[in-house]
Image (cartoon, grey):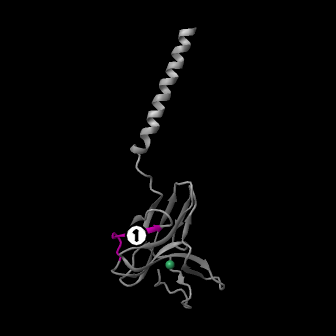
Amino acid sequence: MRPGRIAAVALTALVGIALAGCAAAAPAATAAPASLTVSDAWAKAAGASEMTAAFGVLHNDTDADIRVTAASTPASTSTQLHQTTANAAGEMVMSEVKDGFVVPAHGTFPLEPGGNHIMLMGLTSALVAGDEVTITLTLDGGEPVEVRAPVKDYAGGNEQYEGTGEPSHGSGH
Ligand SMILES: [Cu+2]
């Protein structure tokens, strides 16, 4: 039994060396994972100088919450992070989220018509279905993330902008 036992110990040692080799090689072989990814991104078609919005699902595959603090795109003169909430009169209105969007660790944060969205104000040119908008998300403590959002025609998502005092008129985002 003795020789067999030695062989087993030797094998265990070899496996240990092989595993150590893998672990040492892993960091070099794996690119730094993106901290935040976005799926199903799209933007709503709109005319030049109008407002529109972009949507999608933010995914956080890390162990810590990620805060999106700002968004920007060459497609609009001003870009804001918006939420949609009911005002005192029960109307759905949208407003800027000053603290940003917080995507929970190993969680998602949906951007959708009637909910949170990226507001593009003052479009530099018309966005037509089939176009693509590139949006850069600024992260708190992380590398910026670039999102490509195809433009689609969409009839909903016309919540009024908080503070305009006008009824929902459909020409908003
Ligand atoms: Cu908005």
Instruction: Tell me residue 70's x, y (percent).
Output: 48, 72
- State the residue in front, 153 or 123: 123
- State the residue in front, 108 or 127: 108
Instruction: Tell me residue 29's x, y (percent).
Output: 39, 43
Residue visible at 56% across and 91% down in the picture: 165
- State the residue in front, 96 or 67: 67
Q: Amino acid at mark 1?
A: Ile
The 10 Å Cα crowd at callout 1, few under 14, some 14 to 19, many 20 or more, is many
Residue farthest along the bottom direction in this orientation:
165
Q: Is residue 55 above or below residue 33?
A: below
Residue visible at 50% across and 19% down in the picture: 10
Residue visible at 47% across and 38% down in the picture: 23
Instruction: Tell me residue 97's x, y (percent).
Output: 55, 76
Residue visible at 39% across and 75% down in the picture: 45
Q: Is residue 21 above or below residue 63?
A: above
Which residues lie in the magenta part? 127-138
- State the residue in front, 101 or 150: 101
**Label 1 residue SS:** strand
Instruction: Tell me residue 150's x, y (percent).
Output: 38, 67
Residue farthest along the right direction in this orientation:
88
Quadrant in which the N terminus appears: top right
Whether the magenta-drawn stretch holds residue 102 is answered as no
Q: Is residue 65 above or below residue 30?
A: below
Q: Which residue is mark 1?
A: 135
Picture quadrant of residue 133: bottom left
Badge 1 residue CB within 8 Å of ligand 1: no
Whether the magenta-drawn stretch holds residue 132 is answered as yes
Picture quadrant of residue 27: top left
In-image side of 157 versus 123 (left or right): right
How many numbered circles does the render carry? 1
